[in-house]
Amino acid sequence: ENFRVNPKNRCYICKTGLYKDIIKIKEERNFDLILDGSNIDDLSDYRPGMQALKELNITTPYIDFKINKQEIREICKYFNLDVQSKPSMACFSSRIPYDQDINEEKLDMIREAETFLRNTYNLNQLRVRLHEGKLARIELMPEDIMKVMTNENIKKIKTKLKQLGFCYITIDLEGFRSGSLNEVLAFNEED
């Protein structure tokens, strides 16, 4: 329930609950340890979930060995794993600004909007951020912004996103940025 009100430590609440459940499974099955896939790049942004990993003694080998996301991709390529080019996919809750309630309807709107954009325009990396309940802020890679910004595409996007429940549809001119909703935290600290 604390998670749904979307506080700034939402990820801490989620990771704590998730890993407590995984710890129960570990103990039931007599496993030695639990590994988490966080990498050294994850330490460069506000990540309250990392505190939960420390508190629960979850092993983070990529962080321990200072391996970043690009190096993980290179390791995957070396072993011919098909996940090497998979785009990063943060939790859909991270598309909703802090202190705005999270619910299934909002998450479904975001998921369906991103799926539509990704599949229709062959986009690899994007986010649809949901502001104030009905405003979609679409973040695309800079090279994809002009690809999508044709009159025909704008009409398609507007029609589809309005069908999904969005009232206002915007393209973020700064483009895709991991953790862009954390920018407001830094901005507020400067005040």
Image (tube, grey):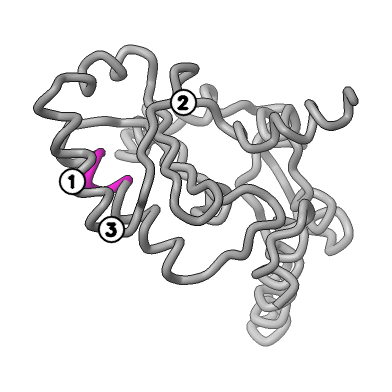
Label 3 crowding class (10 Å Cα cut-off): few <14, some 14-19, many 20+? Answer: some
The residue tagged with tag 2: helix, strand or loop? loop
From the top left corner, tell me how far across and down residue 70 is, in percent.
Answer: 52, 23
Q: In which quadrant will I find the N terminus?
A: bottom right
Amino acid type at image mark 1? Thr
Amino acid type at image mark 2? Phe
For the point 65% across and 36% down, which residue is it?
39
From the top left corner, tell me how far across and down residue 121 is, in percent.
Answer: 17, 32
- Inspect the magenta stretch and tell me whether residue 115 lies in it: yes
Judging depth in this view, the residue of 107 and 101 nearest the camera is 101
Cα–Cα gap, marks 1 and 2:
22 Å
Judging depth in this view, the residue of 54 and 71 nearest the camera is 54
- In the picture of the structure, the residue carrying the numbered disc 3 is 164
Residue that lies at the very extreme toward the left in this rendered image: 152
Judging depth in this view, the residue of 18 and 96 nearest the camera is 96
Give the numbered dot on residue 159. 1
| For residue 62, side relative to residue 88 (left or right) | right
Judging depth in this view, the residue of 138 and 91 nearest the camera is 138
From the top left corner, tell me how far across and down residue 32 is, in percent.
Answer: 73, 68
Give the numbered dot on residue 176. 2
Q: What stretch is highlighted in magenta?
A: 114-118
From the top left corner, tell me how far across and down residue 83 is, in percent.
Answer: 36, 39
Q: In which quadrant will I find the C terminus?
A: top right
- Inspect the magenta stretch and tell me whether residue 73 lies in it: no
Label 1 crowding class (10 Å Cα cut-off): few <14, some 14-19, many 20+? Answer: few
From the image, give the main secondary structure of the stretch colored magenta. helix
Query: Where is 172 relative to 12, above or below?
Result: above
Contact, mark 1 vs mark 2 (Cβ under 8 Å): no
